[in-house]
Amino acid sequence: MATQEADTTGPKTFARGLLIMDVMHRAGGDGLKVAEIARQTGVQRTTVYRFLDVLVEQGYLLEPDAQRRYVFNYARFAASSTLAGTIEQLKPVLQRISAQTGDSSFLIRREDGDSLCVHRELGSYPVQVLTVTIGYRQPLGVGAAGLALLSNLADDDIELVLAANDKKLVRFGGMTASQMRRLIQNTRERGWSAVGNAAVPGVMGVGVPILRHSGAPIFAVSVSSVMNRMPLKRQRFIIDVIRRELEAVST
């Protein structure tokens, strides 16, 4: 057992985390204290504490109550299910957008200060943007969809994101927080985002957010292609295509 506890990396660590998750799931709404979790899993208390800190931080468990009992956060998984359903609903939308534009289209959602690609479709044009794949993550605002998401946040939230990403932005075409603020202002004035030579050199993208009824952005759709294929007139054409296809579905 001592040897297992000493191994804090790799598959054994992952297995212990899953074991704790399973125990918490089976505990239901009553939750468990650290001592009970340690007893049921056979994992030392100090190690249990480390896992619980991460699971609470990531939203898998709720903050401990006054009795120091941890409870599984079932709502997080219900939300994930809803997100998955929305992604499935939007996949045909992206297919139609890429079919009409001939270019790669992307479905992006926000994860804290990052944008995450959750779906991608390729078009028929011989040169496609292939570097942004499903699961690709970058600072929010760097790509066209991420910029559309960032521009639709409240000003205070935008500043929090920019502060968190301050040292990361420079890796994307030398981007700075000041430049990002100008892009946000331009996006708000224009009504859609456009950014080039940032996420991928030689590539330009345009994006449109998908908003909740409250006005908060939940996803964004973008289309990207090589720079010489994206003059202003074509950007407007692509935005019209995206908006028309999004209007045909309810998210």
Image (spheres, grey):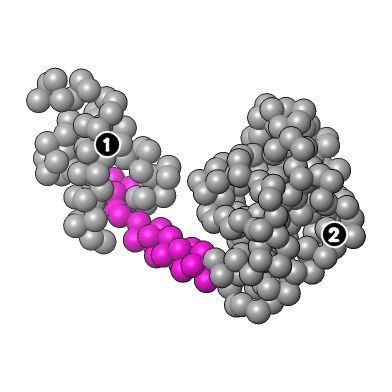
* Quadrant in which residue 210 is drawn: bottom right
Residue 65 or residue 130, whichever sits in front:
130
Q: Position of residue 109 (x, y in %)?
A: 58, 54
Residue with the mark numbered 1? 14
Task: Work out whether residue 110 can be spotted.
Answer: yes
Q: Is residue 8 left or right of residue 193?
A: left
Q: Position of residue 152 (x, y in %)?
A: 73, 57
Q: Position of residue 140 (x, y in %)?
A: 66, 44
Q: Position of residue 172 (x, y in %)?
A: 71, 32
Say if 246 sits above or below 135 in the image: below
Q: Where does the magenta region start and end? A: 64-89
| Residue 66 lies within the magenta run | yes
Specify the amino acid type for callout 1. Answer: Phe
Residue with the mark numbered 2? 234
* Residue for point 30% across, 36% down: 51
Q: Is residue 114 left or right of residue 73?
A: right
